[in-house]
Image: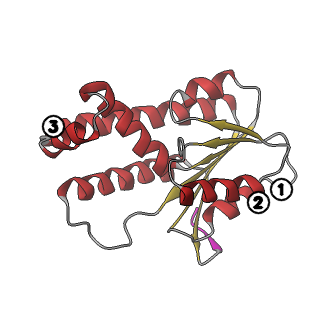
Amino acid sequence: MGQITLITGGARSGKSKFAESFFGDQEPVCYIATNGVAQDEETKRRVALHQERRSTSWITHEAFLGLAEFMEAAPEKAYLLDCATMLTTNYFYHLMQQRFGENYQVIDEQIAGFSQQEKAAVEAEILSEWQKIIAVAKEKAVELVIVTNEVGLGIVPEEPFVRWFRDVFGRINQFLGKEADVAFLVVAGIPVKLK
């Protein structure tokens, strides 16, 4: 019988390390890395650190698109998705590139003028992608551990778009929390069971 586990926490809280230790000796585990291509040296170092910590027997799948279809076709019964925040961000920009092209300046100009209805429609598309992932995990009865950032505990962003997108992250986290069988908040390296 499968289980969905949500692990949330702030930056450098230890949530990824806890998630990686969650499976113990279970094999094989498929690590779903949603970060995309690391562009700067600091991000490359972070990715390398994560790779070094993982068991060499784990399979890595680097993607943020088509994850429901991937999980449906894959034979593995255990998945660690790290992280929901990056998947949501990358999927959002994928949607924007489909609408407005590859120029990020044009994208920024377009989203600055979004109406509430346009924002709601984009958020619904992102939520739909998450609903598909969760549905496959439940249907196949897999072990799925999802790491996500707790985004609502810091400073309120100055920019309206950033405030809205922080709220999108929060609502996605609420959905994942509701759907999860088990949930943890990691604070200062200490996992606190929420559910």
The quarter of the displayed image where residue 13 is located? bottom right
**Element under label 2?**
helix
Q: Which mark is residue 117?
A: 3
- Going by the image, does 163 lie left or right of 65? left
Residue 12 lies, with reference to residue 182, above or below; the image says below
CA neighbours of label 1 inside 10 A, class few (<14), some (14 to 19), many (20+):
few
- Could you give the CA–CA distance between mark 3 and mark 1, rounded to whole angstroms? 45 Å
Q: Label 1 is placed on what type of residue? A: Gly
Is the stretch drawn in magenta largely helix, strand or loop?
A: strand
Q: Are marks 1 and 2 in contact (CB under 8 Å)?
A: yes
Amino acid on which the number 3 mark rests in the picture: Gln
Residue in the picture at 41% in, 37% down: 91
Report which quarter residue 190 is drawn in.
bottom right
Which residue lies at the image location 59% right of the left edge and 29% below the top edge? Answer: 136
| Residue 24: mark in rendering | 1
Q: Tell me where residue 139 appears, x and y as whole percent.
A: 63, 28
Q: Residue at x 63, y 53 (%)?
A: 47
The x and y percentages for residue 173 are 44, 53
Near-viewer residue (48 or 60):
48
